[in-house]
Amino acid sequence: MNDKNYDYLSSQLKYTGFGEDLQAQLKEKLQKQEPEFMLTHQKSYGNDATVATLHFKKSANSDMYFFNKYNLHLQNPQHPDPIKQTFYLNQDEKPITLKEGYNLLSGRAVYKERSDRERQSYHAWMQLDFKQTDKNGNYKIQLYNDKYGFNLEQSLNRHAIKELQDPTQKERLLESLQRGNRHTVTITINGHEKQMAIEAAPRFKNLNVYETNGIKVRADKLYQSSAPDQSQKQDVKKAQKQGAGGDEGDGGVPEQQQTKKRRTKQSL
């Protein structure tokens, strides 16, 4: 067994989010010197269960092994029949970690550094298109690069989010959302602090907002209450003007409202 190769692969597994649980199995497989081998890893996120199958292949010219890809299956109440995706490891790009792969299969977007055909690096939001698959059965990946126009920090600044006031918490929030997490924050709504969960929605250049129980909140309902006073009405108007979170469209203003505004201008 090549000890340096083992150390490298162990570090790679840890960096990709599989921890140290597979090290003993990895060493055992390397000692057998088979042309190819696989390792299996299981992890649960709440009610969501993931099973990853990691693929390793020996070089044709040396005793070095390479971690080339992993297949990830996700099963939960929404998907009693598991959905799956294969994530490839590319030398020119940072790998999709286990948690990022889980987030992608959960329908969320992940912000990663990628390389084009000329090996020039760029950053883009990635999101799986569950309506389209390629010849290998993988869901096609939709990319939204920086030129697309989604600015995560600007979208966050549309809301009175408490965590944005502290530089450390703000940085942690940005990094968490870029990894595709649904992150719990404290938002001031109509003068009251409330815990909400948010996630990046680059396709709509906005945020998705949820109650802590997982129920999605429409952007035009977020700052409304059953009987708002005058100050609350001003908060609602201000929030809608700034583009309160949600994924109805650019800026968070529902298309119906935008159409109504256009018709009013035309009548004038």
Image (cartoon, rainbow, N blue to C red):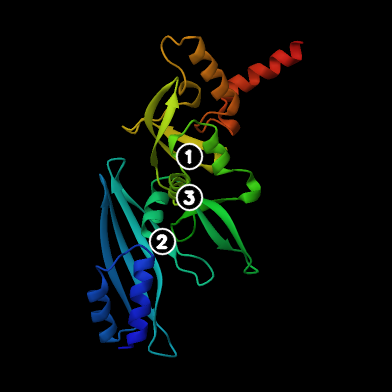
Quadrant of the frame with the C terminus: top right
Dot 2: element: strand
Sequence-earlier tag: 3 or 2: 2
The image shows residue 142 at horizontal and vertical percentages of 54, 50
Residue occupying image coordinates x 27% and y 63%: 41
Q: Amino acid at mark 2?
A: Thr
Q: Is residue 72 above or below residue 203?
A: below
Q: Amino acid at mark 3?
A: Gln
**Residue picked out by circle 3:** 178
Residue occupying image coordinates x 70% and y 13%: 264
**Residue picked out by circle 1:** 164
**Residue picked out by circle 2:** 86
The image shows residue 239 at horizontal and vertical percentages of 54, 24
The image shows residue 102 at horizontal and vertical percentages of 37, 52
- Check disc 3: other Cα within 10 Å, few if <14, some if 14-19, many if 20+: many
Q: Is residue 63 above or below residue 44?
A: below
Q: Is residue 28 above or below residue 97?
A: below
* Residue 160 seen anywhere in this rendered image of the structure: yes
Residue occupying image coordinates x 48% and y 42%: 200
The image shows residue 156 at horizontal and vertical percentages of 52, 37
**Residue at mark 3 to residue at mark 2: CA–CA distance:** 20 Å
